[in-house]
Image (spheres, helix red, strand yellow):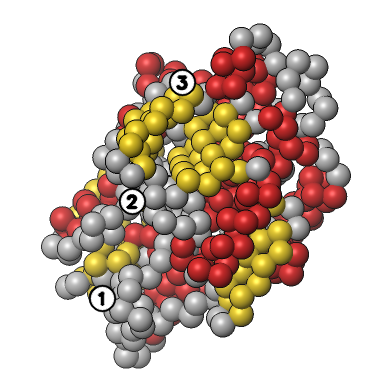
Amino acid sequence: MSHRVVVVGAGFGGLFAIKALRRADVEITLINGTAYHLFQPLLYQVATGILSEGEVAPPIREVLRRQQNVDVRLGWVQDVDVERKVVSVAGPGIDYTVPYDTLIVAAGASQSYFGNDEFADHAPGMKSIDDALELRARIFGAFEVADLHTDPATVEAWMTFVVVGAGPTGTEMAGQIAELAHRNLRGQFRHIDSRKARILLVDAVGAVLNTFGDQLSAKAEKQLDKLGVEVRTNTKVVAVDANSIEVESNGERERIPAMTKVWAAGVAAPPLAAKLAAATGAKTDRAGRILVEPDTSLPGHPEIFALGDMMSLAGEDGKPLPGVAQVAIQSGRHAADQIKRRLAGRETGQPFRYFDKGSLATISRFSAVASIWKLRLSGFPAWVVWVAVHLFYLVGFKNRVTAVLHWFVSFLGRGRSERVATQQQAFARQAIRAYGDPFRRPSEQTEQVG
């Protein structure tokens, strides 16, 4: 019997680990909570009508159709029996188990509301296709509803958009909403001027894109200001309801009437991380990520690897590795290499070395910031780099071609090819809460996307 490898999660870590094992004498079982691989860095473009969900979420079976040693299964891992080497899975209406010789856990990260999970009802995160489609319905719907009202205060509330979190996702989201209001939707409404929309970017930290350094952070904030985005740093969100958001800055509180809120601040490991840590005796950090050995395996369990956003591992600078796609990709390849070395009878345990390829964030069309090694780019040159990098990592030739066509329409023209939003997209969250999930999907478990 071939060596059995179970991979949990079809994000960057899991997918690249599987591809690295395509010629190995192993039988791979991939367990994922969705039938697609999610290119999460472009979710904000789904939410703002640039790309369709299919362009950022190709079917897993199509991506792996030529790899014969993979069995793809839909489900959410509930528990891991490390003694028997079996994972327990809840599928849609069916529970099942899968045995393993080696286990790779790359279940991604969930949105963190810092203990205020009730905020999610009124401020969706940006971690899933469901989130992006709901936000698309809310954003475009806000302009439609504003056009119906005559009371100035009500119109202002519908035309106020608050994005919480000034990291790459929040910055990109705020920039695109501003582009929508000031450029794409201009002149399309009879009773409102979309250019009068108010877009706020709020964060408790002291700078936009604070991990990019002071120079690029300042340039990003300047570009956002040119777009009409109000940037509020050192500002903490203390309350969120259907009609408003309450913030605190310098000890003073302010209630901002706003019908559309986006949460792009904070990530946490999924509940599976805590279950796996308890089963193996491993420790977790404050975000719930598992403290792994230098080779990304779990202490005392060299047959179990935790990758990407699931793991807590210090880089060469002594700081924890960031939860970015490159960490997931490279750790996935490293875990696969360890498996191949073990099967070949070679020495294992080599430490994972992360090669930082830089950071990118787009502010608006033709404008981005890029930190690549010692190189600092902004404006159009950084935007060109951003386009090239994202096209390279989009899975599938068809996805790249259609993404380019939609970018052409959105960035050179004034159209948005994906503006359709349905009532189901806007209100499904409330319906699932009220009536339950017919597939018994665990309420505390998030999509395995990392």
Cα separation between marks 3 and 2: 27 Å
Amino acid, disc 3:
Asn
**Residue identified by numbered label 1:** 293
Number of marks in picture: 3
Quickly name the residue at label 3. 243
Using the numbered discs, state the Cα–Cα distance from disc 1 to disc 2 in whole angstroms.
Answer: 20 Å
76 left or right of 365 in image:
left
Observer-side mark, 3 or 2, equals 3
Q: Secondary structure at mark 1?
A: loop
Q: Indicate the position of residue 63 as horizontal and vertical percent values.
A: 62, 57
Q: Secondary structure at mark 3?
A: loop
The residue lying furthest to the top in this view is 150
Q: Nearer the viewer, residue 161 or 74?
A: 161
In whole angstroms, how far apart are the C-alphas of marks 1 and 3? 47 Å
Task: Name the quadrant of the C terminus.
Answer: bottom left
Q: Earlier in the sequence, mark 1 or mark 3?
A: 3
**Dot 1: within a 10 Å radius of its alpha carbon, few (fewer than 14), some, or many (20 or more) residues?**
many
In this view, which residue lies farthest toward the right?
Answer: 413
**Residue at left 55%, top 76%?**
357
Q: Amino acid at mark 2?
A: Ala
Q: Earlier in the sequence, mark 1 or mark 2?
A: 2
Residue wearing tag 2: 268
Q: Is residue 366 left or right of residue 359?
A: right
